[in-house]
Structures are given as structure tokens and as C-alpha cells.
Amino acid sequence: MDKQRQMAEAELLQLGFSFINENTLSGRVPQDGDVHGVYIQVEISLTGFPIKQPEVRLISINDDSELYKSVPKTWRHLDEFIFSSDPKSTKFYICSMHNWSARSDRGGKFIYERILSWLQSNVTNNWNVDEDLPTWRIIPQFSNAIMYLPDYFLQELRKEEAKTFFSMTAFHTPYVFTSGGEASGKKEGNSYPINEISFQKRIYYFFPESPKEHPFTHLMKAKLGDAFISSKLLLVRLPGNYLFKTLYQLLKTIQQNTDLNKILEKSQNMPVIVMYRGDKGRDEAVAFLASKEYIEGKEDFQIHLMKLESMPKRPMAIDMTVGLLGVGSLGSQVARLLSQKETRRVVMSDPDVLSMENIGRHELSPFYLGHLKSRGLAFELNTKTLSNNFFYMNEDEKVIGISDILVITVGDRQAFDKLAFRKLLGHSKPIIWAWSSPNNILQEIVITTSVTGCLNCYYALTESDKELATFQKIALEEIKAATSIEFDICGNPHTISQMEKMDFLATQIVSILSYYSRHGRFPFDFVNYYWGTDEIIPRAKVGYVQCHPACTCKGDR
């Protein structure tokens, strides 16, 4: 690798570059002439080369080093790094080494040609597909001030007319001052000069005011607690024809087109969110804390860039209302996966409360000991996903009535039979039944619909179908040979589970739900998984469940 670096350095030296320190070379691109009247000066850092891709810093364009205002507003794949409160002191890095790998043919000449290709693409505005990856105009790095935005907030801001300015309340962590004091909750955060606020002693969390019933308030409560102050927050929606590339250009665009001093009255600072037309027509946003000097329209001003965080709008993977009857060790993992799978709605019912023997084998933490599992899961998963898609109900019948599909993991044969042959007798919507043996040696999933046999038909099939009966016999022999029960201090028996295998079963159930949501059908009616001792991958047996001659459900169809 040292030889490869030496060769890369030699090639760059031949191309007119020179060392400015032991890891960095500086040079002109193109080496001679220009690209339609444009040439650039760059610095290439080879620290960690070739394992680490070279960093390419843009130093000047046509010998103009005031890049914060001179970078062409249409240039792309140029990252801006903000290191201080002065927007003029930013650094710019060329993003031209996509899909870097430590290959022997990627030396100094390759790096130079990629930079030259980047310059040519920007000057001609003609990008090839491999180079034109998603890019940003403004990237907030290293900020210890974070603005959290719920998705509905961004949706509403997108609806606003172009060049809209309005204010609302934001709640945030109390400011700590460079003098050592702390802001009082009796005064608004806008009343403190920005140069008196310390951005090294504390991380500041900002939240725009939102409806109290929205789950996003769970996050606000967790981050702020009862110690917070409020500020007026300025929201700006820029028209799509406002062009800028750098943060400074954006700030000056707003400053020159708006009398902020009238809008913001006599504020010493103001948190600001700006939404604008970003790369390839996407809506993007930036947030910063503006100083009084900026508000007053002065040329020299300070800002503190905030990191904006929101969850992207993900496509609905399971566009159904899924009902879960039973949310124990298996059902809670199904619920967790559904929360990560973008499910339209999940309704749950389980009469059990979380007990000590559940800890470590259930999605809920010890905080929920003594609470209903279904209620605790609804609260926990809504909080984790900042959604309102999980609900609990005290009666199975309510879950059954509103669900498009049911998943039943109630845990024992008696409970399954009570549901199958009493509450769900004649149920027309699909049902996924799932259970696991001690030690998860044999795991079974059965799907019943209006055109399949019932659960009892499946029981009969496990005896009449020779291949399935043999498959289960092998598993049952191993189950009998293994220790299946452990006892607590009171002498109560508890079934032994292998949680990695329980998680596997949960993933299979959710995969079936996802398949059905996309295709409106099932690829099979049952699947059995058999885990031999120390097996990492189970053996599987799949098939179909028809109305069995020995079952009375045949006469009902």
C-alpha cells in the first residue's frame, strides 16, 4: 500500500501538483488551459490512502478564493462544511470519488481525471448517471443545536405559498451563557444576544409547537423534561426560482429580499427554518440561529447552524389493519417488526400483564412490569416510531371486528382451540396462526382463509400426510429428549425458548403479511420449521390445507 501511495503521489507531481505537507498536495485543474473559461485550485489529502478515499478541497475558482459568495449557484456535488458562527469561513469539498475502493488502478491520474470530470459536468451541466448521485446544497455538520421536526410539520410547510414568512413558538433547552449562568424560563430565548450563548457547554434541542396528542410530544418530553424555555421561531418558504449554493448566499438572499427587522421586532436572536427547492426539485430545509446583526441587515453577522432532523416519509409496506391476539414473547416481536415495516395500523389484545419471567424474552422493558402487555406495547411502539399506528383493546372481539387480517400467537393449544372453534368459527378474513415448541425445535405457521380448511383440518393433516407426519415425528422426538421447563423461585414452570429462533419465526410471520399486502394472496397455507441441535438454518416443510374429511367444517362450506 505504501508503494501504491508513492505511485499516486508521483503521478500527481507529474500533473503539476506540489506538496503543502506530508499528506496533502495542491494543484490546478485542468493542468493547462481551462474548461469553457473555468479552472480551479484544489487540495488533495491522501491521509489513509488507498483504503480511505482522498479528500478533495476546493480552494479557488479562477483564482477567486471567496468561495462563500463566488461558487456558481448551479454547481452540484460540492459539500459545504460549517466550522464556526461566521458563514464566510466555510470550507468546500468536491464530491467526485463515488464508489471508491482501494484498487491498484486508482492512483494520482485517476483522482485528477475524476476531479476534471466533476468540473466539466458542472460547467456544461451534463452529468452522467454514475456520477449524478443525490447531493445537498447545505449540510449542517458538527452542530450541537438540533431542531426536531415531525413529518406533519414539514407537510404543512410544503403547502405554504412561496416567499412566506411567519412565526410560531418553539420550545428548547435553556441556554447556558459564556459567563456561566443559565437562561430563565421567565424570559423568551429571543431576548439573549447570540454571542452570549455558549455552544460548547450544552447540546440544545429545539421543538416547534405541535398538537399535544401527537406522539411527537413523547420525544419532546424525553429530551426537554420540565426544564425548557420558549422562543419565537421564524419559518420561511422560498420560491423555487431563488438560486443559491452556499449558506452565505442563502442568508443574503433572505436578507436582501425581506425586512427581517420589521418581522422580528427587537429580537436579539431568532431560530429560523428555511424550506427551499433543492436538488432535482426536491424540497429541502436548513435551520439556524440568527444574530441581531443579521436581522438588522448588516453585512457582518453571526449565525449558529442547527442540525435538522426528521423522519423521511417511507412507503407503506403493509397497507392493512393487522390484528394481534397475543403479544407475548413471539407476538411482541411481531409487533416490533411491524413498527419497523411501515404498517398502516396494528391493533392488539392480550389479557396478560408483563411479569418477571417475561424480561429478556419480550420487547417491553422492566419499566412495564405489572402493566398490560398490549397497552405497554402500544405506548412503547408509538413512542419509538413517533407514530400513532398502534392501539390496544381489552376485548378480542373488537380486534377481530376491525382487522383486515389476524395474527394469533396466544401460546397454548387450549387458547388456540377456544379462538378457532368459538370466537373465530366462520370468520371470513385471513388468519395467521403461529406457535413454537419448547426450545423452538418445531415452529408452525398455519394460514386459514375462506377457501382453506380450518385449524382442525391442519391438525388432521399432520397425521394423515405421511411426509408432514414424518417431518413432525423427527422434531417431536428431539423435543422429548431436550429439557423444556425451567422453574422460578416459587416453583412455577416456564417453557424454555431460544430467542434468536423466536425472532426468526416473527420475521417469517411479518414476511407473510408483507407478501399478502402486495399480492392479495398467500404462497402456501402452512409452513413447519425444524431446528436440529446446533442448526443455524432450519429445515422447512410447506403445503396447503384443504378441508379434511375428518373435520366437520366441510359440511359448513
Image (spheres, rainbow, N blue to C red):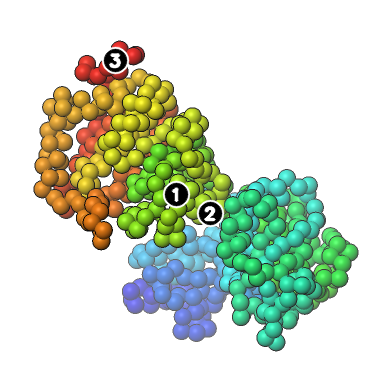
* Residue designated by label 3: 554
218 w.r.t. 465: above or below: below
Of tags 2 and 3, the one toward the viewer is 3
Q: Pointer 1: residues within 10 angstroms few (<14), some, or many (20+)? A: some
In the rendered image, which quarter is residue 248 located in? bottom right
Inspect the image, locate mark 1, and give the three-letter code of the amino acid beneath it: Leu
Tell me whether the residue at label 2 lies in contact with that at label 3, contact meaning CB atoms closer than 8 angstroms: no
Tell me whether the residue at label 1 lies in contact with that at label 3, contact meaning CB atoms closer than 8 angstroms: no
* Residue designated by label 1: 372
The residues tagged by marks 2 and 3 sit, at their Cα atoms, a distance apart of: 46 Å
Q: Pointer 3: residues within 10 angstroms few (<14), some, or many (20+)? A: some
- Dividing the image into 4 quarters, which one contains the N terminus? bottom left
Residue 76 seen in this snapshot: no
Inspect the image, locate mark 2, and give the three-letter code of the amino acid beneath it: Thr
Secondary structure state at the residue bearing disc 1: loop
- Residue shown at the point (27%, 17%) measured from the top left: 552
Of tags 1 and 3, the one toward the viewer is 1
- Dividing the image into 4 quarters, which one contains the C terminus? top left
The residues tagged by marks 1 and 2 sit, at their Cα atoms, a distance apart of: 17 Å
The residues tagged by marks 1 and 3 sit, at their Cα atoms, a distance apart of: 38 Å
